């Protein structure tokens, strides 16, 4: 693959409600800031910019790769980034998750719907205060890659070493001292992997995370006995339970089915991508946790623009196998024994199979037995004659495990599969670790992040220069402090001691000035990405925990799966 780069790793491989306040500035004991405030503000003016909140993931203009014969370098937002090189010649089949991969949901409508329906469940089913119904949802507040401390009611952003660099209790930012006392004061460091912690690792988790921090603040007010009796962890579990109720009773799916365009971005790039993959001789499949009825609604809208009674099965022509209700990540477990059922495309009913081969029911018409004698059911389950009159429709299943999929597609090796999804654990880690599938993570936020990186490309170098100058000052200060210590023990060096103290005072002033410049400049830089949490792939100057997970688990990552069409 050409022009594939590594973005959050160590090196490149090729090519080029109210807001809480920010963390308080540390107090320095050497000199006061009042004397240098004016010159600091003048220098900081060169670094300041207007904070830009992250926009919806809706594509604006057609990307350059849709222009035939284009020889211009790919824009960053349309590139595929690489952690481990991938030879596409070795890939025989390409698979997709559906939700947040093939189907990109509108955060301002879909997440808002999920948020308000969850509030209704908390009030109506779990006895929460009626005031929750008046809560407002800020869909741009939360980002992926954060960690919820369920026990303390905090939301954390960590670097790749799992050091907490930014944290909020509810919607109130914790001070550096509070951070240190909570997460850096014991002999044994927290692993942040226990049951008292939860990762915000999918875009669907953003609304429930925001609702949780609002409930933390409501509990802290002490006005509601029902909340005072609950721990923060219990509140989190209740929110998760309410979200699950919304899924089980079909509340979210029914609303989406009524008007898919309100909740899902239309994407004209999907059909060309699927056609390209099939024309190159590769098989194409879907493995999704959504059931058949909802999958049929979403895919009809995405690939055919059909909704309601206009739905049909034409979209199945772009796939070789569709597996619904897969229960990932259990689908990828090597010890999974989940049965595989086939979906009757005419009725939606499930039928038993023997590892994908249809099982003729007792008392079935003679025509079905005759078809079996002709080999229709004896080919390892690779035909679909009994399921649809038109042979262009692929087979649709529910449940099963990865072994069933390999058999259906006749794929002997996991390394021949490229699977594309949005969930770092449910899609990427599980499929890669268990079967050795090659993986690509879809990170829609990258499109905006890369644009900011290109627009602010000079700022990191400016900050590095400030940091380097500060480090040189530290060296000079240390040398003078050693000289001063030696002078204090020798009465013959009183004059030298006075001069050293004067020099040190000037250096201390410069150090405070440079440190504040760097701190404020870095904060302003991160605010370009997100006014609260900063850059997705960074925590300060370190890679974020999310970036570390992307680097470790995903072979490839990109802002949109259709970016694959730019590569051979």
Image (tube, grey):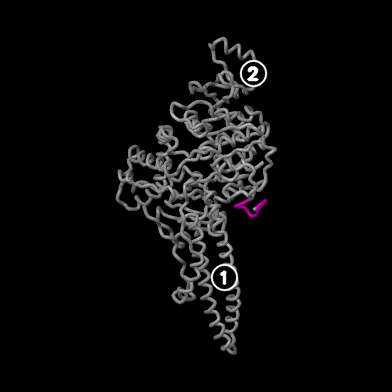
Q: Which residue is mark 1?
A: 470
In the rendered view, tell whether residue 34 sits above or below residue 358: below
Crowding at label 2, few (<14), some or many (≥20) Cα neighbours within 10 Å?
A: some
Which of 155/251 is in front?
A: 251
Q: In this view of the protein, which residue sits in the foreground, 312 or 10?
A: 312
The residue lying furthest to the bottom in this view is: 492
Quarter of the figure with the C terminus: top right
Residue identifier under label 2: 378
Q: Nearer the viewer, residue 564 or 8?
A: 564
Q: Is residue 520 left or right of residue 385?
A: left
Q: Are marks 2 and 1 in contact (CB under 8 Å)?
A: no
Q: Earlier in the sequence, mark 2 or mark 1?
A: 2
Magenta span includes 306? no
Q: Is residue 98 left or right of residue 114?
A: right
Q: Is residue 220 above or below residue 423?
A: below
Q: Whole-percent x and y of residue 175? A: 44, 61
Determine the secondary structure under disc 1.
helix
Residue 321's disc is none
Count neighbours of disc 1 (C-alpha within 10 A) and say few if under 14, some if 14 to 19, many if 20 or more: many
Q: Which residues are magenta?
A: 6-15
State the residue lying farthest toward the top: 366
Tell me the chief SS of the magenta region.
loop
Tell me residue 454's x, y (percent). Answer: 56, 56
Residue 525 higher or lower than 128, as above or below: below
The picture quadrant where one finds residue 420 is top right
Image coords of residue 42 (percent x, y): 48, 71
Q: Is residue 401 left or right of residue 263?
A: right
**At 64% from the left edge and 40% from the top edge, which residue is drawn?**
438
């Amino acid at each position: 693959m050409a022009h594939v780069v590594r973005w959050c790793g160590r090196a490149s491989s090729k090519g080029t409600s109210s807001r809480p306040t920010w963390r308080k500035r540390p107090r320095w004991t050497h000199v006061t800031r009042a004397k240098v405030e004016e010159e600091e503000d003048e220098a900081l003016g060169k670094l300041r910019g207007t904070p830009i909140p992250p926009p919806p993931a809706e594509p604006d203009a057609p990307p350059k790769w849709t222009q035939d014969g284009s020889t211009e370098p790919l824009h960053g937002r349309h590139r595929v980034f690489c952690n481990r090189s991938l030879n596409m010649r070795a890939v025989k089949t390409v698979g997709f998750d559906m939700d947040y991969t093939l189907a990109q949901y509108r955060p301002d409508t879909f997440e808002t719907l999920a948020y308000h329906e969850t509030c209704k469940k908390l009030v109506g089913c779990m006895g929460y205060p009626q005031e929750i119904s008046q809560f407002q949802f800020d869909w741009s507040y939360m980002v992926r890659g954060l960690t919820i401390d369920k026990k303390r009611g905090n939301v954390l952003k960590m670097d790749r070493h799992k050091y907490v660099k930014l944290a909020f209790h509810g919607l109130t930012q914790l001070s550096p001292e509070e951070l240190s006392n909570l997460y850096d004061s014991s002999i044994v460091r927290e692993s942040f992997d226990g049951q008292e912690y939860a990762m915000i690792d999918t875009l669907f988790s953003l609304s429930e995370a925001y609702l949780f921090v609002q409930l933390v603040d409501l509990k802290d007010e002490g006005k509601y006995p029902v909340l005072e009796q609950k721990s923060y962890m219990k509140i989190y579990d209740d929110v998760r339970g309410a979200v699950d109720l919304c899924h089980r009773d079909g509340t979210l799916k029914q609303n989406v089915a009524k008007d898919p365009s309100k909740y899902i971005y239309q994407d004209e790039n999907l059909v060309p991508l699927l056609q390209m993959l099939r024309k190159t001789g590769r098989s194409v499949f879907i493995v999704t946790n959504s059931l058949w009825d909802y999958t049929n609604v979403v895919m009809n809208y995405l690939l055919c623009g059909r909704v309601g009674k206009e739905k049909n099965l034409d979209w199945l022509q772009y796939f070789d196998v569709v597996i619904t209700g897969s229960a990932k990540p259990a689908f990828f477990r090597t010890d999974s024994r989940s049965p595989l059922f086939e979906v009757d495309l005419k009725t939606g009913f499930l039928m038993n199979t023997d590892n994908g081969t249809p099982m003729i029911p007792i008392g079935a018409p003679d025509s079905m037995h005759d078809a079996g004698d002709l080999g229709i059911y004896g080919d390892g389950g690779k035909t679909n004659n009994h399921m649809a009159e038109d042979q262009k429709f692929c087979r649709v299943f529910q449940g099963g495990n990865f072994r069933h999929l390999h058999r259906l597609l006749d794929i002997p090796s996991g390394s021949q599969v490229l699977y594309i999804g949005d969930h770092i654990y449910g899609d990427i880690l599980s499929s890669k670790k268990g079967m050795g599938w090659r993986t690509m993570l879809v990170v829609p936020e990258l499109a905006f992040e890369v644009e900011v990186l290109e627009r602010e490309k000079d700022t990191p170098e400016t900050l590095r220069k400030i940091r380097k100058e500060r480090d040189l000052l530290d060296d000079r200060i240390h040398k003078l402090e050693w000289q001063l210590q030696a002078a204090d023990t020798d009465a013959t060096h009183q004059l030298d001691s006075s001069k050293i103290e004067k020099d040190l005072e000037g250096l201390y002033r410069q150090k405070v000035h440079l440190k504040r410049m760097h701190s404020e400049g870095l904060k302003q830089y991160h605010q370009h990405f997100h006014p609260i949490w900063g850059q997705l792939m960074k925590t300060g100057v370190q890679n974020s925990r999310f970036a570390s997970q992307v680097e470790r688990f995903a072979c490839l990552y990109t802002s949109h799966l259709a970016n694959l069409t730019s590569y051979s």
